[in-house]
Image (cartoon, rainbow, N blue to C red):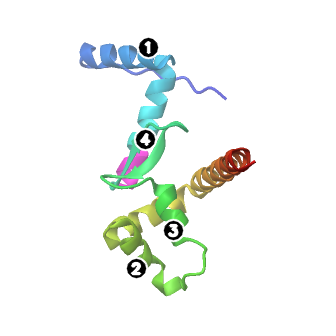
Amino acid sequence: MVNPVSIRFRRAEVLDQLKAEAGARHVSSSALAEELIEEGLRSRRHPLVIFRDGPTGRRAALAGGPDVWEVIGGVVGGDVPTGMRIKRAVEQFGLSAQQVSAALDYYASFTAEIDDEIAANLRAAAEAEVAWRRRQDLLSG
């Protein structure tokens, strides 16, 4: 469902920058504005989280650190006892406990999004392993 809204820019250069960036990304100005507004609202709720481009598109990441899905993959699940998971993530990623908590807070708000990124990474890793094994078979035969 489309919900139109009118936005007035006080500074023409902001609108010019929006149009230029939208053109460079091959998206409409409306689509880019919506993305930027959503990310800005998320960043206000989760100030240690930023958004960056990558092979799978835009994704949440800790400022100066790894992607949120990477941290969550190291904290949630696995064989580490619940009480030790944050400490393990701090050691594994070289993050502060505050950063790990920020990733957990973001995950609590956007669980499905992060779960999808974790699942996509697991699929990509499995596909890469299959390709590597095929190469090894070809080389050994």
According to the image, label 2 marks what residue? 87
Amino acid type at image mark 2? Lys
According to the image, label 1 marks what residue? 23
Q: Is residue 68 above or below residue 89?
A: above
- Please identify, in this view, whether the residue under mark 2 or under mark 4 is nearer the observer: 2
| Residue at 46% in and 25% down | 32
Mark closer to the chain start, 1 or 4: 1
Q: Position of residue 48 (x, y in %)?
A: 33, 56
Mark closer to the chain start, 3 or 4: 4
Amino acid type at image mark 4? Glu
Over which residues does the magenta segment extend? Answer: 41-46
Mark closer to the chain start, 2 or 4: 4
- Calculate the distance from the C-alpha at mark 1 to the C-alpha at mark 3: 37 Å
Side of 28 where 91 appears, left or right:
left
Side of 69 where 9 appears, left or right:
left
Amino acid type at image mark 3? Gly
